[in-house]
Image (spheres, rainbow, N blue to C red):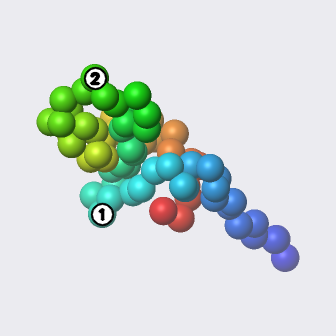
Amino acid sequence: MAVKYKLKTNKAVSKRFKKTASGKFLAKQSGIKHINTHMRSKVKRKLRRHKALDDVNAKRLNDLLPYA
């Protein structure tokens, strides 16, 4: 009888990206960690949101997160 193997989830990717119900991936935006004194409040507020990734990266993430 053939042995069926489970696929492993890439833990580094699972901590950084989130899959939505429609199948898109969300990621945190960069540039908000430190040295923000020169930024306007509006810019910092918008950087708090998650950003939807394009389809090219989503295809790669589907392989890394098989059960997401």
Quadrant in the picture for residue 46: top left
Secondary-structure class at tag 1 = loop
Residue occupying image coordinates x 25% and y 37%? 44
Quadrant in the picture for residue 3: bottom right
Question: Dots 2 and 1: beta carbons under 8 Å?
Answer: no
Front residue of this view, candidates 34 and 59: 34
Q: Which mark is in front, 2 or 1?
A: 2
Q: Is residue 51 above or below residue 24?
A: above
Rendering coords of residue 18 (x, y %): 42, 56
Residue type indicated by callout 2: His
How many labels were placed on the picture? 2
Residue type indicated by callout 1: Ala
Q: Which residue is mark 1?
A: 21
Q: Which residue is mark 2?
A: 38
Rendering coords of residue 64 (x, y %): 59, 49
Residue occupying image coordinates x 26% and y 47%? 49
Q: Is residue 19 above or below residue 40?
A: below
Residue occupying image coordinates x 43% and y 34%? 34
Secondary-structure class at tag 2 = loop
Q: Is residue 56 above or below residue 49?
A: above
Q: Earlier in the sequence, mark 2 or mark 1?
A: 1
Front residue of this view, candidates 37 and 21: 37
Circle 1 crowding by C-alpha within 10 Å: few under 14, some 14–19, many from 20:
few
**Cα–Cα span, label 2 and label 1:** 37 Å
Q: Is residue 10 above or below residue 52?
A: below
Q: Is residue 11 shown to the viewer in this render?
A: yes
Quadrant in the picture for residue 19: bottom left
Residue occupying image coordinates x 50% and y 45%? 61
Left or right? Give the position of 34 relative to 9. Answer: left
